[in-house]
Amino acid sequence: MARLAHASSGNVCRRCRNSVCSCASRVGPTGPTGPGGGGGGGGTGPTGPSGAGGPTGPGGPTGAPGASPGVGGPTGALLVSNGAGGISFLDVGPVNSVVMSDGVEWIAVPPSVPAVPALGLSLWQRAYAAASPWLGTPSAGTSGSQSVINGGTPVPAGAPLNGRPTAAFNGVNSRFQSAVAFGALMPPTGFSGWAILDLNTISTDSGSPVANIAIAAVNGSSVCQVYFRSGGGSPIAGFSLSDSAFATFKAETPGGELTTGAYHVVQWRFTGTEVQVRVDRNPWVTTAFGGTGIPGGLTQTLDIGRNGSQTVFLDGTVAEVATSDTVMSDGDFDDVVSYADFWYGLSL
């Protein structure tokens, strides 16, 4: 390629003004101007319009239905599992759940509803089918393999609650009884439980827990009981537990937190050192368990709907009863109440 040099005038470099410069060899006089270069090429013309798109191809054939039904539920639902190793056992029902071939149930949970933690539920009676036995609901614990049997007059179905089945206890002779010992469901080292129920009447008001109507009690014993008394017109929920020497320790809610003719979530807990009870989202009522040794007499079965002394029966509608062989946390119980609100359409 030719070397590009500076333009010059006469014998002097126009750039360095020297007759001999470092820019280029000495140059001679300027020659005549050469002919002009040819004209530049024409500018690029404007872009032409885009070509029309081709016709839309035919759609493919509709795929075959999946082996499992789709999961319905609210917009923006989050899928969680209630199987072993899962993170939740909150079940939002047949419309919003699906059981996979491995037996794990997947459910749709609205983001605004806390999922109930995967607890070791030892008993979970729900979705009553007006038949005995009342089959257990599966959870991360053994509740799916537990059932309760009718211990008296058959318990009819109650009025549905938000479309969910319930059981109607007549207050005269209807009850259920567990197939295993009370201690297998709620061991003396610590346990928890809840009931979602609507009491029609509360006919007892005794300072002795075992003499009052109960939702859960040791069959034929005063050892442990979740009970209710009228409180002189301001109903009270109580939880009592006896030690190995049969000294009784009880916790009772303030009068009025529990009402008849309305659904509530009654919750109880034995931490190993404390007896605790509460209604809905109200504060826990705590009594120190200062007994001699661990509770005794937990070898009998669990009664649902009859007191420990077997003299009075529950009058009301029960949506569910659950027990855990663990000490549930406050957060766990808060989630249970949130679950009750969502599942049963309550506002507790």
Image (cartoon, grey):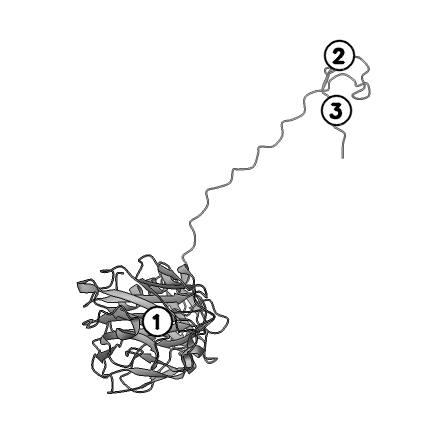
- Look at the numbered discs 2 and 3 and tell me whether their residues touch, using CB distance below 8 Å: no
Q: Quadrant of the N terminus?
A: top right
Q: Residue at x 43, y 76 (%)?
A: 296
Q: CA distance from mark 2 to mark 1?
A: 93 Å
Look at the numbered disc 3 and give the secondary structure of its residue. loop
The crowd level at tag 2 (other Cα within 10 Å; few <14, some 14-19, many 20+) is few
Indicate which label's residue lies in the foreground, 2 or 1. Answer: 1
Amino acid under disc 1: Asn
Q: Position of residue 89 (x, y in %)?
A: 41, 70
Q: Which mark is residue 17?
A: 2
Amino acid under disc 2: Arg
* Image quadrant assignment for residue 130: bottom left
Residue 149 lies, with reference to residue 47, above or below; the image says below
Q: Which residue is mark 1?
A: 96
Q: CA distance from mark 1 to mark 3?
A: 85 Å
Q: Which mark is residue 58?
A: none
- Earlier-in-chain disc, 2 versus 3: 3
- Earlier-in-chain disc, 1 versus 3: 3
